[in-house]
Amino acid sequence: MAEDKTGANRIKRHPFLGDAPDGETTRVIVDGNEFYGIIGEPIAMTLLANGIRTSRTMPHSGAHRGYFCGVGRCPDCAMTVDGELNVMTCTTPLRPGMVVRTQQGLGSWQENE
Amino acid sequence: MRTDEIVVIGGGPAGVSAAFTARNRGASVTLIDEQSAIGGYLRWTLSVQRGLPPQLDGRRGFEVAEMGWNVLYDSGVNVQLHSTAWGLFEDNVLGVVNPESSYQLKADKVIVASGSTDACVPFPGWELAGVMTARAALIAINVHRVLPGRRVALVGNGPEAAEVREAIETAGAEVVAHFSDLARFGAGGEGVVEWVTQGGERINIDALVTVFGSQPDPALPLQALAQTGYSELSGMHVPLRSATLETTSPGVYVVGDAGGLCSTAEASAEGRVAAEAAVEGDDLEQALEQLSETRSVERAAELSRLRPAAAAS
């Protein structure tokens, strides 16, 4: 079932929200590994549903950062998406076939070539 | 340059109320919101809303958001989603950016309903991946139906902490620890958060949600150099506003949480007042009366102190 592929942290049933709608799924590549997400959801949600918590590392300390404010205010969820640096994954919708990379520091355009 | 009579920034209860009121008075209205749907914080709250119009009253937040969405679209307001108003310049010119384009938008009147942001308080481990604000957790769970983790810890107190706890447990995850304050509190892990402790014992977790309250986000009027005063109730400086919620920057109104934290009913009533004032509608007196009924004595007293000097008399 395609739904089961979209990650273990999905809420299928909810007493107030009802059953989760059947969203159209797509494959997404994260750091070379294959995952599935729901088209139109924020990229950060695809990652969180699949148990991926780190989105980027800091330029100097190398410390990890992840989904933090959820509304596009802080820079912690920024990742490299389809070669573009600093994409805010908490507000950017998932599109079919995206290639997502954990951003190392400020990222690099060269490594995408 | 694009133009419109009334431009509303933010599609929460205050902004939707303002846009709907102005549109009903015959004005041409654009509403800008950076999220994927209107509703603001109502989209991610399960709590029952009070003090709203009869058809909305007593419903849960996400239901009110959906109904408001339908009403607004039917009313003919030009709704621009995924759009961020990043600047407010002379003559009420706004800078707007969306995924496709960047443009300027000039308004006769601007009604800012930009809401609030979650407050952040640093503690050891607060920057680890897997630590997130209350709002981030509620959006993941209630809007996108994704659990932040299976074993979740909370830090913070008050009704909002109770709401987050209920949201997590209702969705099927476990709140394994709840700390009401930061005394001797810390979190740790290799890159991602793996444990919390308060003084002694470590508790293993896979997510930590911080609940430190929210604060007004009036960035646009501040950028337009509107005068401010200190709000003790909100814990920060907010724009000074006339009785009809206009700032010292002419034609710029601020409504809802952006002008000081308030209830859904008060935010909605403020939106109505500002819109009636902005379009010089006939129901301003009635709207002001409705607004005063939503305000506590404490809040009304503070707001009368936070008036521009010219309008204080």
Image: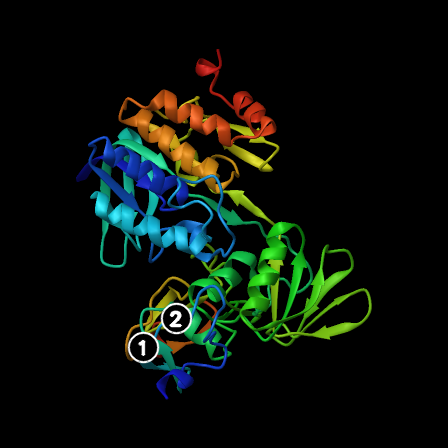
- In space, the residues marked 1 and 2 are separated at their CA atoms by 9 Å
Q: Position of residue A96 (x, y in %)?
A: 28, 77
Q: Residues within 10 Å of mark 2 (few under 14, many from 20)?
A: many
Q: Position of residue B81 (x, y in %)?
A: 29, 53
Q: Report helix, strand or loop for mark 2.
A: helix
Q: Considering only order in the chain, which callout, 2 or 1, is on the residue closer to the N terminus?
A: 2
Quarter that holds the N terminus of chain B: top left
**Residue plotted at (57% across, 26% down):** B302
> Does residue A17 sit above or below A82 in this rendering?
above
Camera-nearest residue between A57 and B12? B12
Residue B160 visible in the picture: yes
- Name the residue tied to disc 2: A43
Residue B34 visible in the picture: no
> Does residue B131 sit above or below B160 in this rendering?
below
Instruction: Name which residue type carries label 2.
Output: Ile
Give the label on residue B51, or none.
none
> Does residue A79 sit above or below B89 in this rendering?
below
> Does residue A72 sit above or below B131 in this rendering?
above
- Judging from the image, the colouring scheme is rainbow
Location of residue B132 by image quarter? bottom right
Give the label on residue A98, or none.
1
**Residue plotted at (40% across, 43% down):** B13
Left or right, A3 with reference to B299: left
